[in-house]
Amino acid sequence: MPSLPSMPRPAVPGPRILLVDDDPGVLKGLRGLLSDEGFSPVEARSAADAARLLDAPGPPPALMLLDLRMPGETGLELLARLPRPLPLPVVVLSGEASPGEAVQALKLGATDFVEKPPSPERLLTALRNALALGELREEQQRLREELARPGHLVGDSPAMEALRQLIARVGPSDTAILITGETGTGKERVARALHLASGRKGRLVAVNCAAIPSTLLESELFGHERGAFSGATSRRLGRIEQAHGGTLFLDELGDMPLELQAKLLRVLETKEVERLGGSLPIEVNVRVLAATHRDLAQAVREGRFRQDLYFRLNVLPLLLPPLRERPEDILQLARAFAAELAGPRTPLELAPGAEEALRAWSWPGNVRELRNFIERQNLLRGDGPLVLRPEQLAGPTPLADRRGRLVPGEKSYREHVDDFERALIQAALDEGGSIAAAARLLRMDRGNLYRRAKALGLSTP
Ligand SMILES: Nc1ncnc2c1ncn2[C@@H]1O[C@H](COP(=O)(O)OP(=O)(O)OP(=O)(O)O)[C@@H](O)[C@H]1O
């Protein structure tokens, strides 16, 4: 076969750089330098011209190189009136006489400044760094928006991909679903995603069966008529009725007392609920989602969980793997939490070894622990960048070491207190073997202990 003559490949246009300078000589020099380096320069002879170009429809240039001293509106004035966050990264060009103005420009959001006349190496380095930072910020903004979407699950690991597909498939059905997985793996978030995928018009009503004392759980779920028991001064709708037309999410179902399990099974089978003290069953249309970090099959064998309810809920089991089994998700989640907590203008930086340390850490509190970790580092950074370092991942201070040497600035007062509290609660959980026993050991309210343990990233027995 005759070979085709080779066609010249069309050049891919490089990033568009908006050059703003009133001096035609400077513009000419910059244009030559940047074109040779593969950029596509766009020129403006005044701040007003630049503002017009930025207002034009279509995506803005990738970066603006802005002279500060110009007749009419100055570079600083232009910078000050641009929307926040800045629509593009800005590097300023400042004459030697204007270091104060350069500092002012940085305060107004410019990424860097280069003195005039610029050395080509310095200028190109500044442009490349600013472009890289701009890309990072865009990525942060995208992650932040993703995380803010209710029910959105961050993570591209095969396990998360499979989970997303499963949610899309089973979300729209009315089948009850049991979501299992260690503490903090995202069970509640998955429940939210399932509710959104269901298209049901009603609300998602969540009940945490471990946080509500068992004596109150029944009236919380089923509601009561006036006078049903002492203190029932008026009729109250239970959570099951509140979820009518929507989804009832029973979190920590493994902690539901056996008698209530029987009542719940009846609701699932008859689609009716009876308020405490009421005489008539009320029809309800609810989709039930349940979650637990316990091994329910084991609980069934031990007689702590009803087998019939387990079978009824386990038609579509959905298992969330622990974070340590999907290390590909760790960095992506960390970046999403950083974008959420520190804002898109403070990208997450990783010191050498940090990525390895993040992947190597066992994350016993899973995604919640990772989020708490990023939140802590964000609080500690003050005005500085959000940098993760391997040594920040050293485990909680053991109780016995709490009188160890203090390293200046290493940890805040709050972090020391959290470390101490974490170790104390962990010790009580180890000793007691259950939330109730640990709460007794610490003479603490059970619900309160449960919430503190969660907040500190501990898994509860
Ligand atoms: N894939 C994910 N993407 C984004 N955020 C997540 C993801 N998984 C978990 N999270 C976040 O991590 C935190 C813990 O998640 P969640 O409360 O859903 O866990 P859980 O498994 O229900 O925990 P528990 O068993 O302790 O009740 C929440 O802030 C949640 O938004």
Image: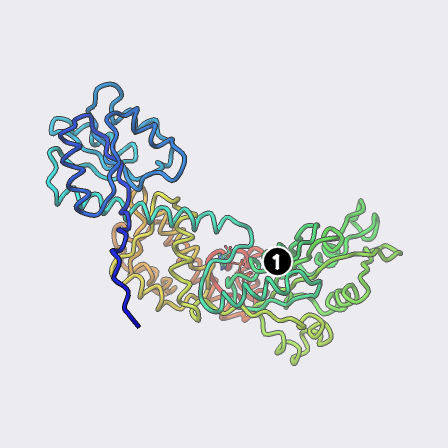
The quadrant holding residue 113 is top left
> Which quadrant, please, contains the N terminus?
bottom left
- Residue 324 pos. (x, y %): 42, 69
Secondary structure beneath dot 1 equals: loop
Return the residue nearer the eye: 43 or 231. Answer: 43
Residue at coordinates 38% horizontally, 40% vertically from top-left? 59
The quadrant holding residue 22 is top left
Return the residue nearer the eye: 94 or 272. Answer: 94
Residue at coordinates 52% horizontally, 64% vertically from top-left? 183
- Residue 388 pos. (x, y %): 31, 55
Q: Amino acid at mark 1?
A: Ala
Whether ligand 1 has any atom under 8 Å from the Cβ at mark 1 is answered as no
The quadrant holding residue 164 is bottom right
Give the side of residue 39 with respect to residue 330, left or right.
left
- Residue 138 pos. (x, y %): 37, 46
Packing grade of label 1 (10 A; few <14, some 14-19, many >=20) is some
Coloration of the structure image: rainbow
- Residue 346 pos. (x, y %): 34, 45
For disc 1, the marked residue is: 211
